[in-house]
Image: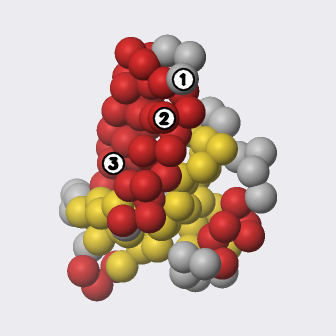
Amino acid sequence: MKRYEVIFSPLADTDFDSILHYIAADNPAAAIRFVDTLRERTIDFLSISPNGGRRLGKVRHIAFGNYVVVYRVETGALRVRVLLVTEGHRAWHRLLKDRV
């Protein structure tokens, strides 16, 4: 089975930092655990199931609990590029327009 490389865009990394700081305001240790787990789950899933998310135009998205991860599959390069990580209740479709 081929494994895809999972790359986080600079803005996706910024999303993780924002999530970390938001949760850390209440519980710094929990914030680190949560962000690390979310990142690991994203890599684990996308590296073996890059087309497993729902299609939305030229990108796909998956949900992990209340969080949405939006990504683009680069099949020829065996790579997945994560574009956006955010809470699902946010207007993430609008956030995505600036990142695609």
Amino acid on which disc 1 is placed: Ala
> Can you tell which quarter of the image residue 87 is in?
top right
Identify the element where label 1 is drawn: loop
Residue 9 visible in this rendered orientation of the protein:
yes
Identify the element where label 3 is drawn: helix
The image position of residue 22, as x and y in percent, is 56, 33
Which label lies toward us, 1 or 3? 1
Residue ID at (66%, 36%): 66
State whether residue 41 is above or below residue 85: above
Amino acid on which disc 3 is placed: Ile
Q: Are marks 2 and 1 in contact (CB under 8 Å)?
A: yes
Residue ID at (57%, 67%): 60
Q: Earlier in the sequence, mark 1 or mark 3?
A: 1
Q: Nearer the viewer, residue 10 or 93?
A: 10
Amino acid on which disc 2 is placed: His
Residue ID at (66%, 67%): 95
Q: Nearer the viewer, residue 57 or 2?
A: 57
Q: Which residue is mark 1?
A: 25
Distance Cα–Cα, label 3 vs label 2: 21 Å
The image position of residue 53, as x and y in percent, is 56, 58
Q: Which residue is mark 2?
A: 21
> Can you tell which quarter of the image residue 70 is in?
bottom right
Q: Which residue is mark 3?
A: 43
Label 1 crowd bin: few (<14), some (14–19), many (20+), radius 10 Å: few
